[in-house]
Image: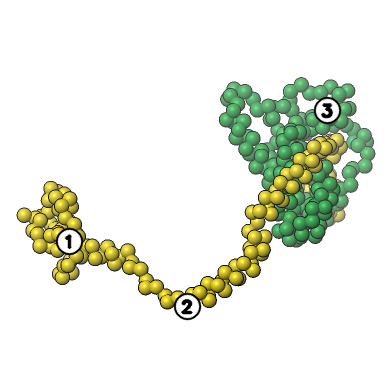
Chain colours: A green, B yellow
Amino acid sequence: MQDAAAGDRDAFDALVRRHQARTYNFVRTLVNDDADAEDLAQEIFLRVWKSIGRFRGDSAFRTWLFRIAVNVARTHLSRRSRWRLFARPASEPDSEAGGAHDDPPSPERLEDDVVRRDAIDRALATLSPELRTAVTLRDVEGLEYREIARVLDVPIGTVESRIFRARQRLRPLLEPLVRPASDYGEPAAMKKEG
Amino acid sequence: MLTCEQATPLVARMADEALGVDDRAALDRHLSGCARCRAELEDQRAVTAVLRARPPAEAPASLAVRLAAEIALDSAWLGVADWRGWSFRLAPLAAALVLVAVLWGGGVQQAEPAESLASIVETWMMGDRTDGLPATSVFWQADVNADTLLVTVLLSGPDDALATGTQDVTR
């Protein structure tokens, strides 16, 4: 980390290799588009490269990286939503927001990873960026509540409230994907928080 | 005993197993008497389970290649544009220039300060008048009219009657 901060390109490449899969996956969840996700992941790491010398180390690198990712995705979503508002006729529904209800995949198709992921991402896309980001950081990325508060720069109570409301809205949309609890096995490696 | 509103954040945390022991005991007491919050907890758990099991999207191989190219380009520009790099490398040259300036400046007599714009304007306005009033004082005379002013402005200059105040323009 120190070497990368000092401008060592090899050290930075190693840092990218370690974090790029997760960063791409996170941003893909937020923007629900492969090409946009790739562009944004590139922009995120480019920003990291440009500002890593100023990274003070007073938070974990992961927290700092997620913070940059959230900011980049937020700017993109805001720009995209303005553009869609401008480009779409008023009578036409927002394809992003309405997508979760269109042609739900059959139970057989939902066994396919890509179809399943797509169904989840379409449901997430119906949420506001604030709710989507909070619930993604918690339930998809497995960050602690405290860390999410640091990434989003909001009080921890706001994080709890956003996650609660996001799940409430997702529940009917994810109904076809809900399995009996026993099917999921042990939960992912998510630490308990005191 | 918690109210439903107070229980809400605890329900969210209980659903993803992020609840401390004390909070859990308090929430358990509330849940034992609140069917609505129990149902909410089950819904929250169901969503959490689905999201945790979301198959991750794999980063395309092109990402690393594009990023490497972008960083190489950015580094090349930074090498040229980074003022810190320039200033560091140019420090000896800057020091030499300062030294030359000091040595050369010591042998040259300091030039007279240039006449200021304010003094030029003042000279133009006052001309040779000795009454302390500027030539433009004609503009705020009470009985001046527009035609007179126009003629005055068009015909007069710093050295003629207006500037010296010898012509009665109000006539």
- The answer to the question of whether label 3 and label 2 lie on touching residues, with beta carbons closer than 8 A, is no
Three-letter amino acid code of the residue under disc 3: Val
Amino acid on which the number 2 mark rests in the picture: Gly
Q: Nearer the viewer, residue A182 or A19?
A: A19
Name the residue carrying label 2.
B107
**Which residue is identified by label 3?**
A115
Gap between marks 3 and 2 measured at Cα: 84 Å
Residue sitting at 19 percent across and 60 percent down? B158
| Most foreground residue, B22 or A99 | A99
Q: Which residue is mark 1?
A: B159
Name the residue located 85 percent from the left edge and 31 percent from the top edge: A178
Mark 1 or 3, closer to the camera: 1
Name the chain letter of the residue that bears numbered label 3: A
Tell me the subunit letter for badge 1: B
Give the structural element (helix, strand or loop) at label 3.
Answer: helix
The answer to whether dots 1 and 3 both sit on one chain is no
Dot 1: what SS?
loop
